Image (spheres, grey):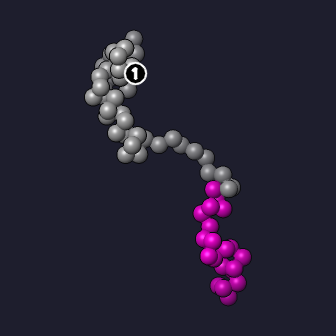
Amino acid sequence: MRVCPVCSKPTIDKYKPFCSSRCADVDLHRWLSESYAIPVKASESDDALDEDPQNPPDKAEETSH
């Protein structure tokens, strides 16, 4: 028997995988408020997005002298 991921009570077919509409709403609220997050690995392209376009790394070195 499956249990509700919010409160651990047995699930009900009508609200599967939850036990009630309340638990379904609690879960939805957690997603919408970003309490849940899907982990991702940072890639090299993500690093490029973090750089300051007004001050690229090459120019940053020139201005620091």
User: Which residue shows up at 31% across the image and 28% down it?
Assistant: 23
Name the residue at the front extreme: 14
Q: Position of residue 28 (x, y in %)?
A: 37, 36
Q: Which residue is mark 1?
A: 17
Name the residue at the bottom extreme: 65
Q: Is residue 61 above or below residue 44?
A: below
Picture quarter with the C terminus:
bottom right
Name the residue at the left extreme: 22
Q: In the drawing, does residue 9 fall left or right of residue 43?
A: left
| 47 within the magenta span | yes
Q: Position of residue 47 (x, y in %)?
A: 64, 59
| 2 within the magenta span | no
Q: In the drawing, does residue 25 fall left or right of residue 59?
A: left
Please name the amino acid that badge 1 sits on: Pro
User: Which residue shows up at 53% across the image and 43% down it?
Assistant: 39
User: Which residue shows up at 68% across the image and 55% down it?
Assistant: 44
Secondary structure predominantly adopted by residues drawn in magenta = helix
Q: Position of residue 27 (x, y in %)?
A: 36, 34
Picture quarter with the N terminus:
top left
Q: Is residue 8 above or below residue 60?
A: above
Q: Is residue 65 above or below residue 59?
A: below
User: Which residue shows up at 60% across the image and 71% down it?
Assistant: 52
Tell me where the magenta segment starts and ends, as one range: 46-65
Q: In the drawing, does residue 32 fall left or right of residue 65?
A: left
Q: In the drawing, does residue 62 fall left or right of residue 10?
A: right
Q: Quadrant of residue 61 in the image?
A: bottom right
Can residue 10 be seen from the camera position used here? yes
Can residue 4 be seen from the camera position used here? no
Q: Is residue 47 above or below residue 64?
A: above
